[in-house]
Amino acid sequence: MSVQLFSPIQIKSLQFKNRIAISPMCQYSAIDGFANDWHLVHLGSRASGGAALLIQEATAVSPEGRISPSDLGLWKDEQIDKLKAINQFILSQNSIPGIQLAHAGRKASVSEPWNGNKKLDESNGGWETVSASAVGYHSNEKSPIALDKIGIQKVISDFKSATKRALQADFQLVEIHAAHGYLLHQFMSPLSNLRTDEYGGSFENRIRLLLEVLEAVQSEWPTDLPLFVRISATDWADGGWNIEESVQLSQLLKEKGVDLIDVSSGGLVSHQQIPLGPGYQVPFAGSIKKETGILTGAVGLITEAAQAEEIVATGKADLVLFARESLRNPNLALDFAKELGVDVSWPKQYERAK
């Protein structure tokens, strides 16, 4: 019986050599949004480690869209060159370089995790944050500014410009970040969106900004290259965004030409109640795939080869994305292949250790 985790998959014009992808994971190691050698080694080692796809960390489409002052960005042309060099290495390893374009909204302007993950004000390197409504993530922090029509148009324009730069930097795949309580998710959930205009209230109004961002991204992104959207399938909180809305949204995104839904969950409110356990988010990916037929990616406490194989083999998802497990082991794809009895090619420099 063939091992499905190591079967190729064609998405648009690209063939992915297996179903293993590296999730976007913030490194908090950039200066003024610029990539450096840390990002080269971090991403490059996972490309040589056998993953089919590497999605670069949440990359801000504007300075105010960064989670922390140390996030990567793609808001100016000068940021392209280093990313292009990194992507050329990833491509040389027969892996696909992807980028997650993001705006943190009200969750922006915080210090790096090792510096306490604290809200920063303008006196200590922070900035004013924006959101769908003037409601903070924590009740004890300064409220964000509710975006007006001009501000909304700037967000859309920033995603469009960043997409153009992503193409110039040789990325082969773009993922729009509409999960984890960041700006697009803030518009989608009734817990953070209290607006009464055409961007608030009904389901159609709350997803409007995401659809407008999608259209702007598609105006710059080639139709033959893959386009993903990451969503939080549920807010894990009463009255919030839920799996039924996620299925409805995924059907719409499929009709509009999105190739895959990267299915995560949570992150919108500090009082969320998440029942953590191995593969706890996989059923959401399975539901969306079953109900809509769109390709899905599964994430969340997936740590073992057999577990990942079962997800793909039983049709719950088409890709399995690894985050913390790939931090622990950059070569997890090579190790999983050995464990599952699949002969895959190694970097020739490492073959003597195979």
Image: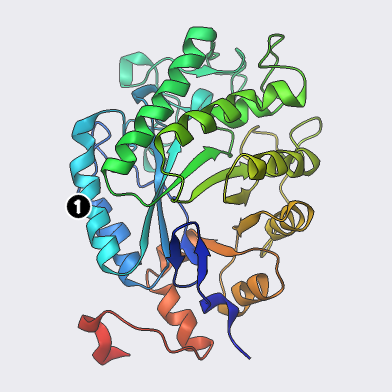
Q: Is residue 248 left or right of residue 38?
A: right
Q: Nearer the viewer, residue 178 or 234?
A: 178
Q: Looking at the image, what colour scheme do you see?
A: rainbow
User: Relative to 297, does residue 271 appear above or below in the rendering?
Assistant: above
Which residue is at a point 36% across and 65% down the rendered structure image?
95
The image quadrant that residue 234 belongs to is: top right
Which residue is at a point 58% across and 84% down the rendered structure image?
3
Which residue is at a point 69% across and 24% down the rendered structure image?
206
* Residue 89 seen anywhere in this rendered image of the structure: yes
Residue at the spot of label 1: 85
User: Relative to 315, does residue 150 appear above or below in the rendering?
Assistant: above
Q: Is residue 45 left or right of residue 318?
A: left
* Residue 103 seen anywhere in this rendered image of the structure: no
Location of residue 67 in the rendering, given as x and y in whole percent from the top left corner = 42, 32
Location of residue 5 in the rendering, given as x and y in whole percent from the top left corner = 56, 76
Amino acid under label 1? Ala
User: Relative to 325, does residue 160 appear above or below in the rendering?
Assistant: above
Q: Nearer the viewer, residue 212 or 147?
A: 212
Q: Is residue 236 left or right of residue 352?
A: right
Location of residue 252 in the rendering, given as x and y in whole percent from the top left corner = 69, 39
User: Relative to 47, does residue 191 appear above or below in the rendering?
Assistant: above
Q: How many marks?
A: 1
What is the quadrant of the N terminus in the image? Answer: bottom right
Location of residue 208 in the rendering, given as x and y in whole percent from the top left corner = 64, 24
Q: Residues within 10 Å of mark 1 (few under 14, many from 20)?
A: few
Could you tell me which secondary element the residue under label 1 belongs to?
helix
What is the quadrant of the C terminus in the image? Answer: bottom left
Which residue is at a point 64% across and 33% down the rendered structure image?
270
